[in-house]
Image (spheres, rainbow, N blue to C red):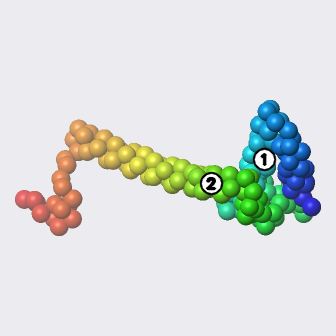
Amino acid sequence: MAPNAAFGLAVLGGALILFLGSGWRRRAASLLALLVLFEAVLALLGYLHGTRSLYQVARALRLSQYTALDVLVRRTAGGLLARRVLPPILTLPILLGFLLLVALLIFINARVMDRLDGWRRRPGQPWRPATQRRCGAGRG
């Protein structure tokens, strides 16, 4: 068993013991369950994006995607929480990556347009529309 899977199961065991109490113990159990959920979601994101460091500790020790998914399919309060929190957690990095790509494309296009405008405004450079340059219109 991978160390991160063993850690998650041990933390869940501690959370179950704390959950039997009341007051601060239940809050601590909830926080421990969220920690395990975060670890499982991180492993799933690692599998989704192909980032081994998110789910693999050493070369042969890794958290299986089936172990990470097991947290989601359980019919417990933790499983319900995982199913409700997982869609935004998975879609937000993808959406932010897409927005970053769009912002990068806008920046590149703005730089190109700025350079072209600077070239057009240089003294001594006659500016002609592209249609006149291609077909030779406007010559003598």
Give the residue number, with chain letter if any, for mark 2.
Answer: 84
Q: Is 55 or 25 nearer to us in this picture?
A: 25
The answer to whether residue 40 of the structure is visible from this angle is yes
Question: Where's residue 18, x and y in %?
Answer: 86, 41
Q: Are marks 1 and 2 in contact (CB under 8 Å)?
A: no
Residue type pointed to by label 2: Arg
Mark 1 to mark 2: distance in Å?
14 Å
Question: Between residues 74 and 87, which one lies in front from this camera angle?
Answer: 74
**Residue 8: x percent and y percent?**
85, 51
Residue found at x 34% / y 43%: 114
Kindly identify the residue that appears in the image at 41 percent across and 49 percent down: 106
Q: Is residue 115 left or right of residue 39?
A: left
Closer-to-camera residue (103/64): 64
The residue located at (74%, 52%) in the rendering is 78
Q: Residue furthest top?
A: 24
Q: Position of residue 28 (x, y in %)?
A: 80, 37
Taking the image as shown, residue 122 lies to the left or right of residue 10, namely: left
Please, what secondary structure does the residue beneath circle 1 have? helix
The quarter of the picture where residue 130 lies is bottom left
Does residue 71 appear to the left or right of 98 in the view shown?
Answer: right
For badge 1, the amino acid type reads: Ala
What label sits on residue 104 in the rendered view?
none
Mark 1, other Cα within 10 Å: few <14 / some 14–19 / many ≥20: many
How crowded is the residue under tag 2: few (<14 C-alpha within 10 Å), some, or many (20+)? few
Please name the residue that numbered disc 1 is placed on: 33
Left or right side of 73 for 95: left
Question: Residue at image x 90%, y 54%?
Answer: 6
Would you identify the image quadrant in which residue 58 lies? bottom right
Which circle's residue, 1 or 2, is located before the other in the chain?
Answer: 1
